[in-house]
Amino acid sequence: MTDPAQHPERPAPNYPGTLVPAGHVEPVPRRIRGFAGGRPVLDTRRARYVWEWPPYPQFSIPVADVTGGELVDEGHEEKRAPGTARRHALRVGEELRPGAAWVWADDASEGLAGTVRFEWAALDAWFEEDEQVFVHPRSPYARVDALRSSSHVRVGLDGLTLADAPSCVPVFETGLPTRYYLDRVYVDFTLLTPSDTVTACPYKGTTSGYWSVRTPHGTQRDLAWAYDFPTRQLAPIAGLVCFYNERVDLYVDGELLPRPERR
């Protein structure tokens, strides 16, 4: 499952948007590796970013660099934004993973012919250099900044105060609403119930906790989350709690913020 701050949420219309059109292709200046069934399937320094839709890219790998598995043609073609793609299964040892990959035809965007775009979940783990990447590749055109702030943040719902913090760490991510991460001592955990949900984000890592909230009007499931061990780039949010601000009343320095819209 993915971070609710990442997917299936779409870029918010009242925040800076994405710049890359569907069908765009760029080189990946990093070593990309993928693993399945306990073994390496691909290892390349010749990957391409391919945007099948604008918010973020996927990796497309030269077929020659898929050395740890066998691509099995499933005889199905689709026309996509970058061009025609033919669906393949992936054989790894004795295991066959259907619908695992798409091989681009000659009419695809420049640089894609002869490459394969894997479904992200078809492989067990992906790495950029030696760091694992979750959910999808990090866009080279996206910024994700976690900044300490003295802004006062209060979170309310159905007349209850869920958190009241004199400072915060807002996370600014290209195309998405600002998220406000709060120190736990300012969160009223008597109103929160832990859940077993675990999600992942390509920029922040894997969550360590989720909480639901019960109010007189019912239960709001998975309303808050935390990353105890985020990626090093997002270290300022370690151990802090963030509320899904589309679903709560969020006040910053006394001003009630409008709930973010979704496309």
Image (cartoon, helix red, strand yellow):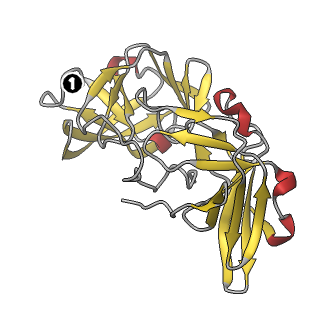
Question: Relative to residue 218, is residue 146 depicted above or below?
Answer: above
| Residue 163 can be seen, yes or no | yes
Indicate left or right for 248 with 31 as reference: right
Going 78% across and 42% down the picture, which residue do you hit?
228
Q: Quadrant of residue 161?
A: bottom right
Q: Secondary structure at mark 1?
A: loop
Q: Nearer the viewer, residue 43 or 97?
A: 43
Question: Relative to residue 174, is residue 178 depicted above or below?
Answer: below
Q: Where residue 54 sits: x, y (%)? A: 31, 41
Q: Nearer the viewer, residue 195 or 121?
A: 195
Going 67% across and 73% down the picture, which residue do you hit?
157
Q: Nearer the viewer, residue 22 or 18?
A: 18
Q: Where residue 124 sits: x, y (%)? A: 56, 38
- How many numbered marks are there? 1
Other residues around mark 1 within 10 Å, as few (<14) / some (14–19) / many (≥20) = some
| Residue 37 can be seen, yes or no | no
Residue labelled with disc 1:
113
Residue at the far bottom: name it: 216
Quadrant containing the N terminus in the rendered view? bottom right
Name the kind of residue labelled 1 in the image.
Answer: Ala
Q: Where residue 173 sits: x, y (%)? A: 51, 40
Going 55% across and 61% down the picture, which residue do you hit?
257
Q: Nearer the viewer, residue 157 or 239?
A: 157
Question: Relative to residue 151, is residue 216 depicted above or below?
Answer: below
Going 36% across and 59% down the picture, which residue do you hit?
263
